[in-house]
């Protein structure tokens, strides 16, 4: 029972982190109808920016305070993401307004390649550290019930809590603020939103900036865990099944999807994996989603796609 | 003036239905084929064959297959690399395990296996559409990535999924020179291009396009969506599987699962989008563009840097290539979302009128 | 106008009811259609006319009721089966295949007659080439009939609306249907285009004896070309008879013009 619970918790926490990345996808899709394949590159670029700036800023400004360095680095990285969002809207999105889905998808893929290249050009391609003070030691829960206690990774726990807080904040933002309402209007119908005076360009910059913020937080957390390197952009590929499982347009779906995939991956790896040769994490999420889609083609919480003639 | 159709009247439907109804086009294609068969072998050196021509031929074939599925039938697939892998590993197993198996047969059988897998993974397209389908196809990609790495049987018990083939021969003649390999691939490409073009202009091609354009209306006319979608997956996977076999056997000689990773899938998708969805010719244009671009950048970037007295290190070249590649993709999609094929046909239309303005 | 020989009842709509969630699109609709006649379905916007056609055609499945065609009763058909039974239709919103030429669009209508398999088509030489040519001849006759020869190779997306409507009709005609379901074939047309379209519909009905069921808003067209009319309002049937009978019916008048209170 002990190992099962440990794996379960581990899965829930990983799942929370997937949800965080998935949120970025859902936000952009909800508000601009674009499936942003560049989300992974955004996570990587943001993490790289954070890592390098937290190194460089103390050097440039000549002080030694870790906390201040991290805060400033975060701020600078965030400004970069906003600038990127603005550039993307200007140079790409506004020019591709009425194109089909696959064209936009490929455009974001192009942006992804570009960001991968530019990120590494600006910040270098070694492995970098991010240290925001997340504790790395393990902790043991429920020592009186289970012998030796359940091993929980403190870093994962903090990360999961942060992710959860962010998700709650974003959900509230969407539901209860004027900007959130405007975003939902745009997601529903671009033209209708425009006709009531909602400025599409500004909305898109806002959305991509928020997605950039989410990417930054995700980048800091994952980067702190795994170190900042190129493979970070592949985290997005892990988050895709989460997005689809939850339904492309649902924020709660991203959370629940993340938890399901996170738990499912860990459990299957530990309990089924050994029979199949190991390493099944790589496809488990996708195959799971495939089967769910066969039953519900729009994901668990997505909107039904109705074809009108 | 040169490209006028005046005076070329068709007196029966057969003539009107030809692939190249305009005489100048027929001449042009004839010259192109002659050049490909005679000129290229005389003029090209080994580097050109190995780095550009042979990859171009094989990837054109794969792009052709993918275009049938995505461009003609409208089903987004991000798992093409997996189908190439299935074709390659299946061909490998037939070649290595069956005594005296000819290379061509092995590769074709690899294609058949890819067809079976393609139909299986195509079944979701009957229920799932659009982006959801795109992500579902990634299941195929990652599953087969894993399978060829971890399931030892596929790679004849090699530890890392790496396999290699040698001694390719066709009816007793060895195919190991660059020219030999070039002709081998060229033959495959030409034959498959003809078959594909025939399919695309017959009623199955129209069924595919009807499903792509409006599948509700297609059903009302009596088109069976199941048959149309699954045949698209089948034909596409067959061609892609054969291309995979060629890629492994002829181009690489020795490969591991990473040769058919998701990057390959994206690469092929770029080819057909830049080349032109729903166009056989577009597949060739796109393949040429994507194959030649890195080579050009590799030469041009250092040269460019030297103009300014800056030596550009290999890492920086790699990163800049990514940036330029990504930037070009976006540029293309903005400027001509219908791809090079559309640019080509627009140019031809202008050429029809030349030297008159309208 | 020559007298058309109108035959027995071939199509019966029996107590069809259709809901979308809480919205009642059709409530207990019954009427019949005789062979070789031109039957119009009219009514104010939102009356459920397109939904009715969609039910006959298998695009929607009604919650209650059934359709009887030539003695066989069905309650749950899919569009392909209905197409095979001999029904063809056009759409109000022009469901043309935008990526294909006029010729190709109409050729898709011949799909049910194409017999060659995948391999024969890949090779093309022989059976597939012959079949393609034969079907092409048939389709060219339709193109002649609809007077769109000049546009046969043009992608349909580039044609003006009136011509697109003709291609839609051509595609339906290519199916050699026994019953032609036309959903507002004259929508958005000017007077001349409407005259052309009326002529085409009547010619089809005359020459091939095709039964026509059409939805139409333009009253003069309806009165001119139809033999009998069904009137729908808010999903219910409020009139059924010859054009003159329907025109004089008080229920129909109040539905269109409103009653004075």
Image (tube, helix red, strand yellow):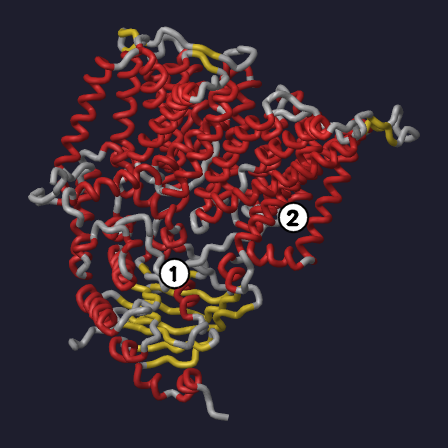
Q: What is the quadrant of residue A39 in the picture?
A: top right
Nearer the camera: disc 2 or disc 1: 2
Instruction: Residue A295: give x, y in percent of width and height.
Output: 57, 45
How far apart, in angstroms, are the residues tagged by discs 2 and 1? 39 Å
Instruction: Residue C75: give x, y in percent of width and height.
Output: 45, 61
Residue at 70% in and 24% down: A129
Element type at marker 1?
A: helix
Left or right of C133 on screen, residue A6: right
Instruction: Specify whether disc 2 shares its chain with disc 1.
Output: no
Q: Which residue is mark 1?
A: C57
Q: What is the quadrant of residue A275 in the picture?
A: top right
Q: Is residue A173 above or below residue A286?
A: below
**Which of A253 and C33 lies nearest the eye of the viewer?**
A253
Which labelled disc corresponds to residue A251? Answer: 2
Instruction: Residue A284: tell me if it is visible.
Output: no
Quarter holding the N terminus of chain C?
bottom left
């Amino acid at each position: 029972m002990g190992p099962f619970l440990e794996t379960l918790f581990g899965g829930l926490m990983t799942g929370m982190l997937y949800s965080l990345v998935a949120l970025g996808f859902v936000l952009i899709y909800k508000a601009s109808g674009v499936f942003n394949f560049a989300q992974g590159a955004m996570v990587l670029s943001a993490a790289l920016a954070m890592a390098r700036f937290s190194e460089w800023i103390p050097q440039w400004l000549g002080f030694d305070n870790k906390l201040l360095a991290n805060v400033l680095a975060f701020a600078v990285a965030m400004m970069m993401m906003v600038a990127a969002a603005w550039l993307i809207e200007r140079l790409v999105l506004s020019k591709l307004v009425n194109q089909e889905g696959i064209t936009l998808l490929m455009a974001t893929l192009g942006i992804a390649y570009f960001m991968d290249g530019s990120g590494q050009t600006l910040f270098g391609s070694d492995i970098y550290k991010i240290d925001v003070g997340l504790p790395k030691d393990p902790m043991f829960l429920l020592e009186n019930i289970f012998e030796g206690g359940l091993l929980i990774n403190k870093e994962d726990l903090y990360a999961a809590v942060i992710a959860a807080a962010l998700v709650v904040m974003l959900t509230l933002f969407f539901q209860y603020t004027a900007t959130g309402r405007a975003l939902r209007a745009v997601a529903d119908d671009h033209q209708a939103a425009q006709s009531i005076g909602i400025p599409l360009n500004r909305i898109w910059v806002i959305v991509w900036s928020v997605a950039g913020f989410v990417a930054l937080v995700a980048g800091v957390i994952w980067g702190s865990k795994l170190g900042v390197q190129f493979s970070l952009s592949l985290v997005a590929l892990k988050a895709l099944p989460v997005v689809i499982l939850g339904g492309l347009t649902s924020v709660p779906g991203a959370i629940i999807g993340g938890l399901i995939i996170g738990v499912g991956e860990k459990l299957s790896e530990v309990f089924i994996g050994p029979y199949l040769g190991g390493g099944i994490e790589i496809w488990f999420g996708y195959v799971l989603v495939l089967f769910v889609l066969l039953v519900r083609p729009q994901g668990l919480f997505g909107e039904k796609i109705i074809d009108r003639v | 003036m040169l490209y006028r159709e005046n005076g070329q009247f068709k007196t029966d439907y057969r003539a009107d239905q030809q692939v190249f109804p305009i005489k100048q086009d027929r001449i042009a294609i004839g010259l192109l084929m002659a050049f490909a068969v005679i000129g290229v072998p005389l003029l090209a050196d080994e580097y050109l064959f190995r780095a550009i021509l042979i990859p171009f031929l094989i990837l054109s074939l794969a792009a052709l297959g993918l275009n049938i599925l995505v461009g003609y039938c409208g089903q987004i697939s991000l798992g093409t690399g997996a189908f190439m892998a299935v074709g390659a590993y299946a061909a490998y197993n037939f070649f290595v395990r069956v005594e005296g198996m000819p290379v061509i047969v092995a590769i074709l059988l690899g294609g058949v296996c890819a067809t079976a897998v393609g139909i299986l993974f195509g079944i979701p397209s009957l229920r799932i559409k659009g982006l959801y389908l795109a992500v579902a196809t990634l299941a195929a990609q990652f599953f087969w990535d894993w399978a060829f790495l971890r399931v030892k049987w596929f790679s004849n018990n090699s530890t890392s999924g790496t396999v290699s083939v040698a001694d390719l021969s066709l009816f007793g003649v060895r195919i190991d020179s660059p020219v030999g390999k070039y002709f081998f691939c060229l033959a495959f490409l030409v034959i498959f291009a003809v078959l594909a073009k025939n399919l695309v202009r017959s009623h199955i091609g129209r069924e595919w396009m009807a499903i792509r354009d409006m599948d509700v209306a297609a059903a009302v006319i009596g088109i069976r969506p199941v048959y149309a979608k699954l045949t698209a997956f089948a034909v596409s996977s067959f061609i892609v599987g054969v291309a995979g076999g060629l890629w492994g056997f002829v181009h690489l000689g020795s490969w591991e699962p990473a040769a058919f990773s998701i990057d390959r899938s994206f690469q092929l998708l770029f080819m057909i989008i830049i080349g032109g969805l729903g166009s056989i010719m577009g597949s060739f244009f796109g393949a040429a563009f994507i194959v030649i671009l890195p080579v050009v950048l590799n030469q041009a970037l250092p040269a460019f840097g030297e103009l300014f007295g800056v030596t550009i290190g290999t890492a920086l070249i790699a990163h800049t290539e990514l940036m330029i590649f990504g930037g070009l993709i976006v540029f293309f999609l903005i400027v001509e979302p219908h791809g090079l094929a559309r640019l080509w046909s627009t140019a031809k239309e202008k050429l029809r009128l030349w030297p008159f303005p309208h | 106008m020559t007298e058309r020989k109108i035959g027995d009842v071939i199509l019966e709509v029996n107590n069809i009811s259709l809901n979308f969630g809480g919205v009642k699109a059709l409530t207990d609709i019954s009427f019949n259609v005789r062979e070789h006649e031109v039957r119009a379905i009219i009514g104010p916007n939102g009356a459920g006319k397109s939904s009715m056609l969609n039910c006959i055609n298998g695009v929607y499945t009604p919650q209650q009721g059934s359709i009887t065609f030539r003695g066989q009763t069905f309650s749950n058909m899919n569009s392909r089966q209905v197409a095979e039974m001999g029904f063809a239709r056009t759409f109000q919103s022009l469901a043309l295949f935008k990526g294909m030429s006029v010729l190709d669009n109409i050729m898709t209508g011949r799909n049910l007659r194409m017999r060659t398999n995948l391999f024969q088509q890949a090779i093309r030489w022989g059976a597939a080439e012959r079949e393609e040519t034969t079907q092409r001849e048939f389709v060219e006759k339709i193109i002649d009939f609809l007077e769109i020869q000049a546009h046969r190779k043009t992608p349909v997306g580039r044609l003006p609306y009136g011509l697109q409507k003709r291609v839609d009709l051509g595609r339906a005609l290519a199916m050699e249907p026994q019953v032609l379901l036309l959903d507002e074939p004259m929508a958005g047309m000017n007077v001349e285009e409407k005259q052309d379209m009326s002529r085409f519909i009547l010619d089809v009905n005359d020459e091939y004896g095709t039964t026509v069921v059409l939805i139409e808003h333009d009253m003069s067209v309806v009165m001119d070309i139809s033999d009998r009319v069904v009137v729908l309002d808010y999903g219910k049937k409020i009139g059924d008879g010859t054009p003159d009978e329907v025109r004089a019916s008080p229920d129909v008048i109040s539905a269109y013009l409103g009653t004075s209170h």
